[in-house]
């Protein structure tokens, strides 16, 4: 038996969460066209035959400007430190200056697999210069893939299984994560906010599950609080006659029911918490 932790790191919007979801064949990590969607480390468990992989999806590599972003960067560093294998994911528009030199140098003894994602968006001839650039910075394991349609994932999994250290499984074979349902429900609500709103609104919001009641008869009851930083943002999020918030709730409920496999009654409330992204105490309460 072989098992180990595998950290997925890379810049925002290179497809880290999409790759995790494709590997697990389930939507575990929320996905958005906007950068910096992932805020917390998410553990996804893949069991195949005698192999069990513990994938750590991480926030995108950025230069932090405020407290929340600093905590996100710390999560990346911790995930890299804890990993047995590192997947560094890039896209076909990779530039050598994007190489996270300091981070990966601290993990020199660990197997590093570079994944070139989004190969479905460019001709194959366009990949050769990218591979050449990667080889020049001494990257030996390079695997082109498309996380969107699954191309190259068989090769990627075989490579990962080859590098996994020997050891017992840490989780039951049917487990897909170590996070509670509350976490994923909050993430699915936040994903809808990211999809429906523009500019600063998505980045100024966070979601807290205030109440989660499982019922033997009838729908489960979920009460979620969406925090924003300003009263004007609250007005935008709620919308005229509450229509915007109703739309978020309706779409989020569908996603939640699909994930949980049961019907839910979802109630959303919007609250103002000024400068919460810089509030260390509040961020700690959120689990950062």
Image: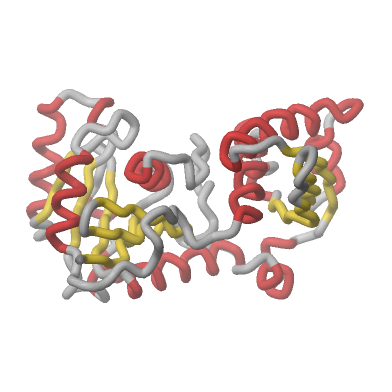
Extreme residue in the front direction? 216
Residue 189: percent from left, percent from top: 67, 42
Q: Quadrant of the N terminus?
A: bottom left
Q: Is residue 81 above or below residue 115?
A: below
Of residues 46 and 41, the one nearer the viewer is 46
The picture quadrant where one finds residue 171 is: bottom left
The picture quadrant where one finds residue 287 is: bottom right
Of residues 199 and 286, the one nearer the viewer is 286
The picture quadrant where one finds residue 92 is: top left
Of residues 240 and 275, the one nearer the viewer is 240
Q: Quadrant of the C terminus?
A: bottom right
Q: In the image, 282: left or right of 26?
A: right
Q: Is residue 180 above or below residue 241?
A: below
Extreme residue in the right direction? 241
**Residue at position x 59%, y 38% from top?**
261
Q: Is residue 251 above or below residue 35?
A: above
Residue 107: percent from left, percent from top: 24, 73
**Residue at position x 42%, y 65% from top?**
76
Residue 46: percent from left, percent from top: 33, 53
**Residue at position x 59%, y 50% from top?**
184
Of residues 234 and 152, the one nearer the viewer is 152
Q: In the image, 222: left or right of 90?
A: right
Q: In the image, 127: left or right of 99?
A: left
Q: Visible in this render: residue 62?
A: no
């Amino acid at each position: 038996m072989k098992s180990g932790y595998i950290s997925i790191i890379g810049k925002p919007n290179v497809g880290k969460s999409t790759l995790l979801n494709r590997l697990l064949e389930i939507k575990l990590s929320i996905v958005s066209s906007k950068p910096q969607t992932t805020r917390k480390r998410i553990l996804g468990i893949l069991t195949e035959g005698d192999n069990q992989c513990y994938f750590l999806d991480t926030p995108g590599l950025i230069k932090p400007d405020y407290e929340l972003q600093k905590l996100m960067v710390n999560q990346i560093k911790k995930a890299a430190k804890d990993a047995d294998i590192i997947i560094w994911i890039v896209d076909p528009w990779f530039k050598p200056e994007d190489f996270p030199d300091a981070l990966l140098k601290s993990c020199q003894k660990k197997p590093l697999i570079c994944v070139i994602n989004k190969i479905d968006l460019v001709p194959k001839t366009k990949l050769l210069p990218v591979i050449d650039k990667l080889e020049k910075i001494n990257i030996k394991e390079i695997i082109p893939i498309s996380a969107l349609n699954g191309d190259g994932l068989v090769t990627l999994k075989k490579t990962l299984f080859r590098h996994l250290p020997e050891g017992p499984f840490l989780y039951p074979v049917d487990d897909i994560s170590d996070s509670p349902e509350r976490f994923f429900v909050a993430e699915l609500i936040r994903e809808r906010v990211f999809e429906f709103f523009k500019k600063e609104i998505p980045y100024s919001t966070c979601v807290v599950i205030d109440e989660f009641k499982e019922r033997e008869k009838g729908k489960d009851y979920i009460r979620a609080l969406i925090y924003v930083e300003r009263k004007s943002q609250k007005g935008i999020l709620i919308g005229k006659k509450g229509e915007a918030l109703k739309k978020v709730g309706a779409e989020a409920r569908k996603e939640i029911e699909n994930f949980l496999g049961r019907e839910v009654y979802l109630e959303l409330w919007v609250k103002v918490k000024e400068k919460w992204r810089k509030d260390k105490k509040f961020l700690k309460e959120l689990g950062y």
